[in-house]
Amino acid sequence: MEFIKGSMATAVTALNKFKNFSDWFDKLLFEARIVDDRFPVKGFSVYMENGMFILRTLRQLLEGELARTGHKEMMFPLVTTDELFAKEAEHIKGFMKEVFVIERAGDRELDKKLVIRPTSETIMYPMFKLWIRSHADLPLKVHQSNNVYRYETKATRPLFRVREIPWNEAHTVHATASEAEQQVREAIEIYTNVLNKVCIGYLLLKRPDFDKFAGARYSIAFDAWNPDGRVNQVGTVHNLGKNFSRVFEIEFETRDGRRDNPHQLCYGFGYSRVIAAIIAQHGDDRGCVFPSTVAPLQVVIVPIYFKGQEEAILNYAKQVFDSIKDGVRKKLDDRQDVTPGEKFYYWEMMGVPVRLEIGPKEVAESGVTVFRRDTLERNVVPLKDVGEYVEQLLEKIDANLATKSRRMMEEMIGDAKTLNEAKTLIANRRIARVEWCGKLECAEVIKENVGGEIRGSRYDIVEIPKNGCIACQQPAKEVVYVARAY
Ligand SMILES: [Zn+2]
């Protein structure tokens, strides 16, 4: 794997991700060759080699999980007609303002306008109607990784808020409500497994009714923390009930011979949002810190040349390189025209989890100095042990990143009993845990006074309200999390 040398002069190190998140993030995306946001169409960006590597790796991790659980990969068209798109009333209401519509081809006006998918319900479900005849055809579980298009009207931000969104969407169809419920749990497990592999800290929330997916019965979401206090929705799971199967006339014959509409789910995993979370959560003032699972390069070997000993040092470095097993993504940075300090700086910015340093001392003592990117610690390891040591260290680094990230998630949350307390938390880039009566009016009061919105209540644990709604003081129905969001 070859990396193009970045500009050494522009220091990411001058920025702190908690204080200057936007500048830190934008600079890092460019310097670490994740995304180039200078593409001349707003909201569309170019994934450079490292961004693309992570995207492809995430895709493999997720698609492996989906295959393991019996989802079939398919590829559906990019477009639907405006007629089909309008079928589900809530759905069109939710997406109308942000869809791209094709009205012309060449110099001809199209008779039927084409809607470019903002998500694929209205593209897949006319086909589901044709495919599903009886209970024997169920469950149907399909998925596809694709790009969806939404005309984001708020300020765009690379990876977070874009108009071309690389994601995976899965759609399932079930005979009974309880099978659909079971599928909600499976979908959550799939996303949890992938997010755990990239060590992301998040809240699993049931969205309030007013914020559920357009056309769904209810929505569950994974909200990852972000250094600027805004939560980053990386995945969602929607139970559609029979809302779509009724309007798309999907019917099946039940075991006892009746006609019925099946229950449906759709769930989406935002690759670009997850890349954003990986960089934002794990990175530090020196640059990216990648978990080994997605690191484009896992180990870099840096010879520290001394005059007259160049050859001996390089030969020893090659021995070290060979002692790291082939499955590991490794590189020997043997450049002689770049100082070790510059190489350290560069590979730290690039987020390489492990660096092996080889100088005259290492050669003389048959040792290797091992530097870990997550804690910035150095250890000397005998050459004969280094292969195994590095493999274990990569796992340790991932475990440490996961622990740190979850701890930060917890630390970001603060309890608020008054609107003012909640407001202070949000202003300090934190997440407020408050009690809410469930009324829409109170949600609006909270939004106006606190500066964040209700993201939902915990889905994975039960939290019982004790004090009363933060807005109206009436008995509270649930404990909810309030935050600013991307
Ligand atoms: Zn209230």
Image (cartoon, rainbow, N blue to C red):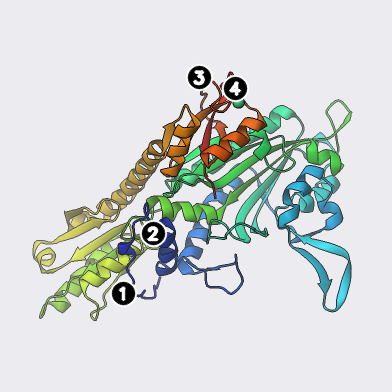
Residue type, label 1: Ala
> Is disc 1 surrounded by few (<14), some (14 to 19) or many (20+) residues within 10 Å?
few
Secondary structure beneath label 3? loop
Disc 1 marks which residue? 9
Q: Is residue 390 visible?
A: yes
Q: Is mark 3 within 8 Å of ligand 1?
A: no
In the image, which is nearer the foreground, mark 1 or mark 3? 3
Residue drawn at (31%, 68%) of the image: 346
Q: Give residue 435's position: percent from left, percent from top.
A: 53, 26
Is there CB contact under 8 Å for labels 1 and 4?
no
Determine whether label 2 and label 1 are within 8 Å by CB.
no
Real-space CA distance between mark 2 and mark 3, rounded to the nearest whole angstrom:
55 Å
Instruction: State which image quarter holds ligand 1.
Output: top right
Q: For the residues carrying marks 4 and 3, which lies nearer the camera in this image?
A: 3
Q: Does residue 83 lie above or below 171 as drawn?
A: below
- Look at the numbered disc 1 and give the secondary structure of its residue: loop
Q: Report x, y in % for residue 252.
A: 85, 36
Query: CB atoms at circles 4 and 3 under 8 Å apart?
Result: no
Give SS at disc 4: loop
- On screen, residue 135 versus residue 35, left or right, reads right
The residue nearer to you, when weighing 209 against 475, is 475
> In this picture, is 367 found above or below 240?
below
Q: Earlier in the sequence, mark 1 or mark 4?
A: 1
